[in-house]
Amino acid sequence: MADAPTQHAPAQYPAAERLDLVEDLHGHQVADPYRWLEDTADPRTVDWSSAQDDLFAGAAATWPGRDAVARRLRELLGAGVVGVPIWRGERCFFVRREGSQEHGVLVTSVPADPSAGPDAPRAERVLVDPMSLDPTGLTTLDAWQPDLEGRLLAYQVSEGGTEESTLRVMDVATGDVVDGPIDRARYSPVAWLPGGSAYYYVRRLDPATLPADEHQYHRRVWLHRVGTDPATDVEIFGEGQDLRSYYGVSVSRSGRWLTVSAATGTAPRNDVWIAPLTADATDPDRPAGGPAPEVDRERTERPSLSPVAVGLDARVGLWVGRDGRLYVATDLDAPRGRLAVTSPLTPTPDTWVDLLPQDDEAVLEDFGVLDGPELDAPMLVAAWTRHAVSEVTVHDLVTGARLEGDRGRVPLPGLGSVGGIVTRPEGGHEAWFSYTDHTTVPHVHRLDGRDGSVAVWSRPPGTVEVPDVVTRQVAYTSADGTTVRMFVMTRADAVGPDGAPTGPRPTILYGYGGFGVPLTPGYSASILAWVEAGGVYAVANLRGGAEEGEQWHRDGMLGAKQNVFDDFHAAGERLLADGWTTRERLAVSGGSNGGLLVGAACVQRPDLFRAVVCSAPLLDMVRYELFGLGATWNVEYGTAADAEQLGWLLGYSPYHHVRPGTAYPAVLFTVFDGDTRVDPLHARKMCAALQHATTSGLPVLLRREKDVGHGARAVSRSVDLSADTMAFTAAMTGLPLG
């Protein structure tokens, strides 16, 4: 394959005034020459952004193969997807996207003939279709939750990419909206009380009562009665907590117990409380299971919340089982996770008894209970990841002992990822979960606890022909001697009989490395299109994620953040050493926190990479807390208000490490005007700084997209974005497309 062509930067970049602005912060002299680009209303920002739009459009027109790769991306997405079902009796709810659809639609189904068997045809009906709500494709379905009886559905939608969820309730039988809209419900869980007359949820306080810079904070847990004015909702919890707190809330299937959790921002720890909602909940002689008495209005409006775990440096999740036990999923004293049980009457940590102790290598991800009368004994199904690859095991529910022989492990189709273990809330012998890997579109599988059999429950609506791809999981050594792993994918004909590459190829290295988010195998049209065209794609499981548990996360946060970047650089060096690529053919890609990652890679190791795709990034780590949801992330990164933590941030803040006269890689920033999480100002300032500084002759470009935000988007917009970034990367690294 020929060397990468020379891609020259524009003769002149749009004018960008450099301010002589230097601030003294805890004794550090911090320059910010492009502070004015933070203000979208500043005429200079408007003109500069418009000029960058023109610059990008002109450059993109020169990249060959863009239309061909867009067509291939559409083909690879053409299978669509079906989500894991949520069951309410014989009615199930799931999201399905057919290949031609811009968004998934929420579907409900019931047996077409109630007297027929469980495998008989089912009658389906669409409940929520974002394209019917908004034909422009700018409205997204954010979340949904049926009530315990399956008669009502709470659902949340956002418009224009803002993720500002509005909550409504639908009558499932008629499709009529019977409650809402309730605004300010971003990231809100919905916990229904039995009977569907009321639910708990999370809503921000009225912004009219708050300072302008606190409108995105001050959440509270509320009790809402269906059909009433939200202004009359009863505040349950949140006053006196940190203004950045996020809350979880759930009600047990019996309706007897309420649990509430609180976490400060994205901290890797939370507090949890529990409260009885019925008079008999605290009766130690009450038999487990059985229907709850009528909802106690006084208790639901004024629940007596008792602390379960407060002030601990750990994550704790609670679930009250049908057997009356309180199940506790936690990383307390177990960085890879464990599952304990106790009584909801005496729930404090000193009473917890391990059901699934911590595994030395595998991370506990999820669990489900099978306890139907058809079973000889109730069972516990557990999902784990071992070095980012999923496993599913089956255990005795009472003791936690793994079942013997083949019954103790659920067979999976390959080395991939399991998503969600869902069981019937009223009990049963079945569990549903999704499975995907690098070449398999997600399928939903059904486990039958009676005989341990596993079968495909639903396939994607369409079919797609995927390329013949081989995947290797490579272990390598980071700067401090830590072993890190990455997946390396390439076309089957690009490796020899020994599995080694037949020659260097254009390569994309992708990473994230933050917030305890693991990068596990999954179907990706972008990866497959790149590999099919002849490239190599690598995904690094960096510290800061959770591939190896919570300690792996903490080894890449706060003052240890440089470990993430070192892991990433070492991944690039390993790709070179093993002959997968060369420096002239190696590109890096990342978004959001991953945008920070590749921004740091760009300025720390400009010699190592040919091109950088930096999407919706954080880049000014001195001022990130002042915009979007930045203040909720200082538990991950640190705060500039603290002298020591400012030192951490300045140590790697990409914007503050751009040095004039440096030969930087080619860079493409992609930003979204509707992004209410990560403000596009980061990319604007960094783009201007790099355009001023670089001497490599490689382009620095900004791709701006309107009316879309940080998260979900229409398929056509996803295809356009991926086609542009792939065409840019191919042009910079010499990969022919189409």
Image: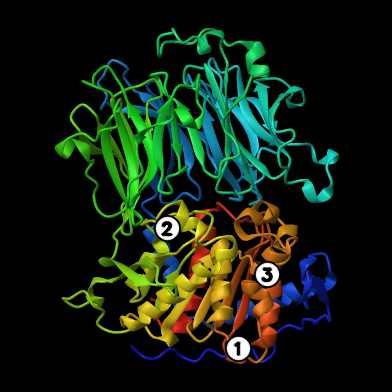
520 sits to left or right of 498: right
Which one is in front, 272 or 206? 272
Left or right of 315, for residue 94: left
Question: Residue, x 47% and y 16% (percent of image)?
Answer: 254
Q: Nearer the viewer, residue 685 or 605?
A: 605
Residue 584 x, y percent position in the rendering: 44, 87
Q: CA distance from mark 3 to mark 2?
A: 29 Å
Seen in the image, is 424 located left or right of residue 664?
Answer: left
**Corner quadrant of residue 709:** bottom right
Element under disc 3: helix
Identify residue type, mark 1: Ala
Eyeballing the image, is 415 above or below 9?
above
Q: Which residue is mark 1?
A: 9
In the image, residue 328 sits, relative to residue 257, either above or below, namely below
Towards the viewer: 506 or 286:
286
**Given this view, does label 1 or label 2 mark the residue nearer the observer?**
2
Image position of 30 with respect to 431: above or below:
below
Seen at 38% across and 60% down, the residue is 75
Mark 1 and mark 3: span between their CA atoms?
34 Å
Q: Nearer the viewer, mark 3 or mark 2?
A: 3
For mark 1, give the secondary structure. Answer: loop
Q: Position of residue 492 (x, y in %)?
A: 24, 71
- The earlier-in-sequence mark between 3 and 2 is 2
Q: Amino acid at mark 2?
A: Leu
Q: Earlier in the sequence, mark 1 or mark 3?
A: 1
Q: How is the image coloured?
A: rainbow
Quadrant the C terminus occupies: bottom left
